[in-house]
Amino acid sequence: MFSSWEPERDKEYILEGSLIRKDGKLALFDAVVSEGETVSIASIKEKYDFDPKDEKVKIAGRLVTLRQMGKALFGHIQDVWGRIQIYLRKDTVGEERYKEFTEIIDVGDIIGVEGTLFRTNTGELTVNVTEFVLLSKCLNPLPEKWHGIKDVEVRYRQRYLDLIANEEVRRIFITRSKIISVIRKFLDERGFVEVETPVLQPVASGATAKPFVTYHNYLESELYLRIAPELYLKRLIVGGFPKVYEIGKNFRNEGVDTTHNPEFTMLEFYVAYWDYKDLMEFTEELLSFLAREILGSMKITYQGNEIDLTPPYRKVSYFEILKEKTGKDKEFFLKRENELRKWAKEVGLQKVDEMTHAKIIDKIFEHFVEGELIQPTFITDFPKILSPLAKTHRNDEDLVERFELFIGGKEVVNAYTELNDPVEQRERFLQQLKEKERGDEEAMEMDEDFIKALEFGMPPTAGEGIGIDRLVMILTDTPSIREVILFPAMRKIKDEVNI
RNA sequence: GAGCCGGUAGCUCAGCCUGGUAGAGCAACGGACUUUUAAUCCGUGGGUCGCGGGUUCGAAUCCCGCCCGGCUCACCA
């Protein structure tokens, strides 16, 4: 049962009426819906939609529509999962209670109702209300019922309004949650152990990016918010975990656009005794499993493009596709730096003189190749100078055993056979330090503690990172990363006094 | 950081080009209505036109600066 209504408070509220809404003072109702008895709107629809048969139900939610007709009224109450119609008749609840409802309850309020299910003349499953309670008052008007809320700034800054008003938005975030839970299920069933590694790290390494810096007062040292969990997860492989994964936030102190948010969610997983070829197959399995579980189909539409997630995916090597798109071969990119620089300027790449050799190659690839990879495509065998943590290719000293998977023109997966030779790893870090001295701000940091771990022996291992936000974008057909992050990074609104 | 676009009632928008004291729908408020669902019908109230400055007799409208947001580029796996 609902806890008892307190008539004195009702009167108080009714007496003050709309004044209470303006003064911002409100006698809160302490009525509660007792635990375990209220059922969700979604479960009622699921259970009784075919046959309501006067089932007694008790539900709570936000009143989002209201149609009053004198001696009866209709409305809908809603939560993130769905909405259900309620029907209130004067001759069912009594004259007093009916009057109370119309006088104290407005669209936007959180209410609880109790009643029996029936179907209206138009066939909609509806609760014929016998008892109701105001659970929380909404002091502000809700966004418009028909057009919802469109102002993107309001949608991001006050996401709760977006969620109340826009069904599509609710769907996206529910799908996001499902995607993450299906990924966990997939990995757990295959023997992976989920772990948590430090977000605050003394060395920001494991990726090429600018970190956020903070300070620990007690340890009296600077710490960095992680740009990647990679080096810690590999330490766990050294420690004997054969299969580990972590899903969590990474932080990069860089620009904001439709595919970048300063904090974003990554899945990283590592498997001992696998190589990058095993990971390609595993990635195909994972993505087709996701498509089946989430969408029930291998075919998706992303921003107008039909994308087929049925394995196997196209595999093409880094320099093969570069040659296809630019006519220049690996030799040109890797061995003839001066000619490359000249040519890069000719094709319109900016700030070439400020870039390192590696960076120019990376830029050229982004410019000529990335956006065109609509169907799932593994780009394999990257140049070594772009991949300081990946193992040298078994057939080519210039390359590493690495792949990235592109879908819808976006990089979604990055993976490689891990470099497990501590001597070579130190050399690669030193190479990065040189790049840093030459002005590459994103070059990777030396991590001596990680090298020490490698010196104890890391088994041959393959590791992979999946950008969860971008994956959600593709599976929900959204054009901007902000549409799949509940509270995307926004500029602080300046205090008017300080302007 | 650059270019383009936007900011008008609680929400969605019109008005701006061509300067003359701000408008619609929904929401709110009052009334009618016992199967409605963008309910309907009658009536009422509601504005720092993002902020600041300039031009002008007069600025939502023209000009300049700033703030916030979006897109594209740059940056960035």
Image: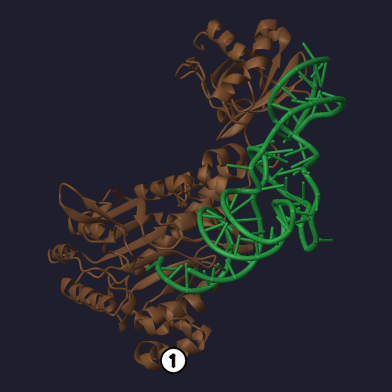
Chain colours: A brown, B green
Reading the image, the residue beneath label 1 is A342
As rendered, which of A344 and A382 lies closer to the eye? A344
Q: From this view, report whether residue A435 is shown above or below residue A465.
A: below
* Residue A297 seen anywhere in this rendered image of the structure: no
Which image quadrant for residue A55?
top right
Q: Give percent across and percent down for residue A201.
A: 23, 56
Q: Residue at x 33, y 64 (%)?
A: A210
Is residue A446 shown left or right of residue A416? left
Quick one: A53 or A95, which is closer to the camera? A95
Classify residue A85 as left or right of residue A361: right
Answer left or right for A393 relative to A99. Answer: left
What residue is at 15 percent from the left and 62 percent from the top?
A: A449
| A5 left or right, relative to A388 | right
Percent of width and height locating residue A7: 56, 6
Residue B75: x, y in percent?
42, 71
Chain identity of mark 1: A
Res A394 seen here: yes
The residue drawn where x is 44% and y is 77% is: A363
Residue at 37% x, 64% y: name it: A279
Identified by mark 1, the residue type is Lys
Could you classify mark 1 by the number of other residues whose Cα lies within 10 Å: few (under 14), some (14-19), or many (20 or more)?
A: few
> Judging from the image, what secondary structure is the residue with disc 1 in?
helix
Residue A310 position in % (x across, y down): 53, 62
